[in-house]
Image: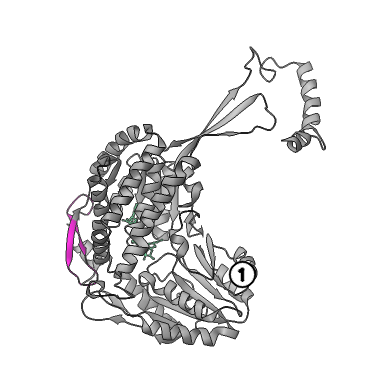
């Protein structure tokens, strides 16, 4: 039984606005619940309610908003077992991952920005270079209603990461969760409401792609989208049409470069964790390993052993390392990559096939002897398949790493941290981790996002909190005399003076240079 089949087959044929979507547990096929496919009118009404709630929310001092978001974070922690349990059942992911990769970082991001938000968004004065008779002030004004559209792989953390920050910045949020995992979004909303927080400020609209499209058309002031590249293009162009600023968090194809001097044990463990965590359904998964020939054999052997040790199964029946495949299409994608790779000379070192029986499972798969004519080295996998390719030098690895059109995360392993740092500077990616994997996805202090087709804009980091606001510049003339020498009337005498003044101020060694040395 598959989610793709169920989510379309159970909706009435009219699609948008008709019928309901069922949510299935991918580990068992059990129906967990269903949600309505909301109409464009319903979405517009939700945005309207959110806008009204936002006006009074924005009027609160930021410290008060932070106190309330903190209350939400604490409510989530108090209910962590119930939340993680539903999350694990709706996605089939291990409880450790439900708790530590979703609930905990959601709270960590909220707590961090509750602490830092007032300082980051405090109005500030910008010193002016030339116009000393004026003062410039910057104020961070909330945008209004932020539409958050999210996928199924981290269906709690991804929305909450963005929502908490949006609230702190003074916005309301309308969330359109993936149609594959809607129940956990509704649980997040239930926790918000039951914590006594303003219900209309946080709305959830359920449905498929059409509901997401309706949200962009419903009068939102910003859109944060996380999902596939193809959908991202559609969402970005819909936002462009309406001049809505957007953040695009799209796919990834993270390379992991293992240099000749790497700690092979750490690199092997990191590659296996980074490739199979969340069943490889992570936009920053290790999607290709480039192993220097000096360590390639040792690395491959160790990765093979570690991959074979992984326990796969239904997380509800006890601790497992790798759970279910959330979205059944990913099983077809994995099989197609493996078939293509084997035809072109790859060796299946571990796994290689779907697990038959109840639920949607795929064996953690390691491929050796990979080359760059294989799809598995070039296109997103988004499943539990890790290909290894032997390279002659770090330069060769770097060339391959950079030739892909995606650039979200990348990983470099070397004992020489300075060397690795310099190599990292040359990798085309939004984030490069040295001797580590995945961890930056939940690091509130640092910006997260991609280059090239991996998207644009950033979530997390202090700049992204500012991006959730309009920056307003207020400028005040200190003296405000009855006329200004730059205003009308223009005269010949004035022009002659202007000529001298521009030379004096902007010419080499001029006043501007002296002023900039002074201030
Ligand atoms: O994502 P989609 P899907 C990749 C992965 C996967 C592919 C598709 O390779 O196979 O993307 O996954 C909503 N206007 N990633 O189908 O289609 C949709 O309802 C507005 C990478 O889940 O991108 C859902 O809520 N919204 C990714 C959200 O967009 C629209 C994680 C994402 O759906 C819409 C998951 C439209 N026209 C999959 N069409 C990552 N970067 O983490 C759809 N949606």
Answer whether residue 81 is visible to the viewer in this image: yes
Residue 482 shown left or right of residue 98 in the figure: right
Residue at 44 percent of width and 56 percent of height: 249
Q: Is residue 297 above or below residue 335?
A: below
Q: Is mark 1 within 8 Å of ligand 1?
A: no
- Residue 387 placed where, x, y %? 46, 79
Quadrant, the N terminus: bottom left
Report the label total.
Answer: 1
- Residue 434 placed where, x, y %? 55, 68
Indicate the quadrant where residue 333 lies: bottom left
Q: Secondary structure at mark 1?
A: helix
Residue farthest to the top, as pictured: 482
Answer whether residue 153 is visible to the viewer in this image: no
Residue at 39 percent of width and 74 percent of height: 276
Quadrant, the C terminus: top right
Q: Let me know if residue 375 is in the magenta part.
A: no
Question: Which contiguous range is marked in magenta?
Answer: 15-34
- Residue 36 placed where, x, y %? 19, 52
Quadrant containing ligand 1: bottom left
Residue 123 shown left or right of residue 129 in the figure: left
Q: Is residue 82 above or below residue 96?
A: above
Indicate the quadrant where residue 259 lies: bottom right
Q: Residues within 10 Å of mark 1 (few under 14, many from 20)?
A: few
How has the structure been colored for display?
one colour
Nearer the observer, 104 or 38: 104
Q: Is residue 100 above or below residue 414?
A: above
Nearer the observer, 247 or 184: 184
- Residue 350 placed where, x, y %? 39, 85
Nearer the observer, 429 or 202: 202
Residue at 62 percent of width and 17 percent of height: 480
Q: Let me know if residue 22 is in the magenta part.
A: yes
Q: Which residue is mark 1?
A: 417
């Amino acid at each position: 039984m598959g989610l793709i089949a169920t989510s379309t087959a159970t909706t009435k044929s009219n699609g948008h606005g008709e019928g309901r979507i069922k949510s299935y547990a991918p580990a068992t096929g059990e129906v967990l619940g269903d949600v309505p496919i909301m109409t464009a009118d319903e979405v517009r009404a939700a945005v309207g309610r959110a806008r009204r709630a936002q006006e009074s929310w924005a009027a609160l001092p930021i410290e008060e908003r932070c106190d309330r978001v903190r209350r939400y974070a604490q409510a989530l922690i108090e209910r962590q077992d119930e939340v993680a349990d539903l999350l694990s059942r709706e996605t089939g992911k291990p409880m450790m991952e439900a708790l530590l990769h979703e609930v905990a970082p959601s709270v960590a991001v909220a707590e961090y920005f509750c602490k830092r938000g007032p300082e980051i968004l405090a109005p500030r004065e910008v010193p002016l270079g030339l116009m000393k008779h004026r003062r410039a002030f910057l104020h961070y004004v909330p945008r209004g209603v932020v539409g958050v559209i999210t996928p199924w792989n981290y269906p709690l953390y991804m929305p909450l990461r963005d929502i908490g920050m949006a609230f702190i910045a003074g916005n309301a949020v309308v969330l359109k969760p993936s149609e594959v995992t809607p129940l956990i979004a509704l649980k997040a909303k239930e926790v918000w409401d039951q914590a006594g927080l303003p219900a209309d400020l946080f709305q959830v609209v359920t449905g498929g792609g059409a509901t997401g499209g309706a949200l962009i058309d419903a009068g939102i002031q910003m859109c944060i989208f996380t999902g596939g590249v193809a959908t991202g293009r559609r969402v970005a162009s819909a936002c462009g049409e309406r001049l809505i600023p957007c953040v695009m968090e799209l796919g990834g194809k993270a390379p992991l470069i293992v240099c000749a001097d790497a700690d092979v044990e750490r690199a092997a463990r990191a590659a296996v964790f980074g490739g199979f965590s969340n069943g490889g359904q992570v936009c920053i998964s290790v999607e290709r390993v480039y192993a220097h020939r000096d360590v390639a054999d040792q690395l491959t052997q160790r990765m093979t052993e570690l991959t074979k040790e992984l326990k796969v199964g239904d997380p509800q029946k006890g601790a497992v390392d790798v759970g279910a495949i959330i979205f059944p299409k990913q099983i077809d994608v994995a099989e197609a990559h493996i078939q293509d790779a084997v035809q072109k000379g790859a060796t299946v070192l571990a796994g290689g096939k779907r697990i038959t029986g109840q639920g949607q499972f795929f064996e953690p798969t390691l491929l050796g002897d990979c080359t760059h004519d294989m799809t598995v080295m070039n296109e997103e996998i988004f499943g539990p398949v890790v290909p290894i390719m032997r390279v002659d030098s770090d330069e060769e690895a770097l060339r391959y790493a950079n030739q892909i059109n995606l650039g979200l995360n990348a990983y470099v392993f070397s004992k020489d941290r300075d060397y690795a740092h310099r190599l990292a500077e040359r990798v085309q990616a939004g984030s490069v981790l040295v001797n580590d994997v995945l961890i930056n996805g939940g690091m509130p202090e640092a910006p997260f996002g991609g280059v090239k087709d991996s998207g644009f804009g950033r979530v997390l980091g202090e700049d992204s909190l500012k991006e959730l606001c309009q920056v307003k510049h207020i400028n005040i003339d200190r003296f405000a005399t009855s006329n200004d020498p730059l205003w009308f009337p223009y005269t010949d005498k004035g022009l002659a003076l202007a000529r001298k003044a521009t030379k004096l101020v902007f010419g080499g060694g001029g006043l501007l240079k002296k002023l900039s040395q002074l201030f």
